Amino acid sequence: MENRAFAPAKVNLTLHVTGQRADGYHLLESLVVFVGVGDRITVAPSQALGLTVTGPRAAGVPTGPENLVLRAAALLGSGGAEITLEKHLPAAAGIGGGSSDAAATLRALSALWGVDLPADRGLSLGADVPVCLRAAPCLMSGVGEVLSNVPALPAMWMVLVNPGVEVPTPAVFRGLSRKDNPPMSAVPAGKDAQGFADWLATQRNDLEPPARAIAPVIDDVLEAISASGGLIARMSGSGATCFGLFADAGSAAAAAHQIKEKAPAWWVDHGALGSFA
Ligand SMILES: C[C@](O)(CO)[C@H](O)COP(=O)(O)OP(=O)(O)OC[C@H]1O[C@@H](n2ccc(N)nc2=O)[C@H](O)[C@@H]1O
Ligand SMILES: Nc1ncnc2c1ncn2[C@@H]1O[C@H](COP(=O)(O)OP(=O)(O)OP(=O)(O)O)[C@@H](O)[C@H]1O
């Protein structure tokens, strides 16, 4: 019997870099959410382990053992499965594509093989894998392994825009001018979308300035999102994908349409925030 799992885009609404460990990894505080835009994983029983990558964003995605899907399978056990990864998210884009694929694979294969999820929740595969296993709004800290609940967020829709420039995460962290930035303030409860966006505007993504230095086109992306009427425009993770937040589905769809017309070469998608595990 086949098992399917959705690998939604991960978005860092905030990302405060507050320190650095002796091994070089950075201490973070990040409000992470997930959008109904993403990759699809299908696993079917098989003697051997195999991976096929399909979908509109398959080009350039590794198909060998370095693919995070196969690394997730190896972490879980040594069973067989025919895995299909339908790729919709751009790679190296700051929206956790590979990490979310790894998390979805862990979910689908643990069900297929009847085995427990790994004790480290996939942290050894990448700092974003534990949060992607949750696939629901949460506060991420430590280097990505400490997850805590947040108050319910208002219903919100998001437009995601990627200009097609890959920004390598290590280079962005290396470009930080300070590692000891001020922490995040507490996530407020009971706000509507506008009130929540007003709070968000007082928080930061500390990786935005170094990413913009590496890929100045991020400035144009943020400007295009702002001009499309979003409540706030900001970069996710280490970039270059940026997001706009909207209070209703119709304005998010209209903004996505407007940005696509303006910049046909960019990847643009939209969806609702939610829980997907
Ligand atoms: C930027 C974020 O996406 C925010 O959610 C994550 O912190 C990075 O998650 P990820 O891409 O899954 O990260 P990994 O694959 O573990 O690490 C990629 C590289 O990012 C840097 N890195 C990552 C996480 C972290 N807390 N500190 C770091 O300095 C390291 O140079 C590392 O070699
Ligand atoms: N399943 C996968 N999908 C996309 N890229 C993958 C996958 N497995 C391995 N990779 C490799 O990982 C690199 C980083 O891509 P990925 O989409 O995981 O990252 P990301 O944008 O850095 O995520 P984030 O910064 O939000 O953690 C790619 O350049 C690619 O070579």
Image (cartoon, rainbow, N blue to C red):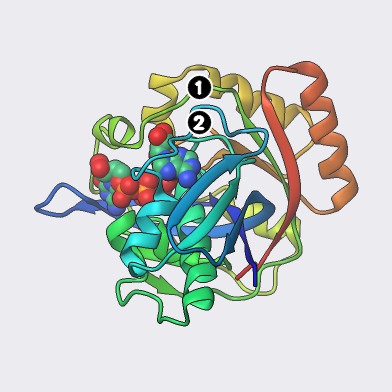
Check the image and report above or below for 235 versus 107. Answer: above
Q: Is residue 210 left or right of residue 24?
A: right
- From the image, state whether disc 1 or disc 2 is nearer to you: 1
Residue 270 percent coordinates (x, y): 75, 44
Viewer-proximal residue among 195 and 211: 211
- Residue furthest to the front: 47
Dot 1 or dot 2, earlier in sequence = 1
Q: Let me know if residue 145 appears in the view.
A: no
Asked if the residues shown at circle 1 and circle 2 are in contact, with their CB atoms under 8 angstroms apart, the answer is yes
Neighbour class for label 1 at 10 Å: few (<14), some, many (≥20)?
some
* SS state under label 1: loop
Which amino acid does the dot numbered 2 rest on? Ala
Viewer-proximal residue among 137 and 39: 39
Which amino acid does the dot numbered 1 rest on? Val
The total of numbered circles placed on residues is 2
- Residue furthest to the left: 22
Residue 195 percent coordinates (x, y): 70, 59
Check the image and report above or below for 56 versus 264. Answer: below
Viewer-proximal residue among 203 and 58: 58
Check the image and report above or below for 97 versus 144. Answer: above
Residue for point 73% across, 17% down: 263
Q: List the residue tagged with mark 2.
A: 240
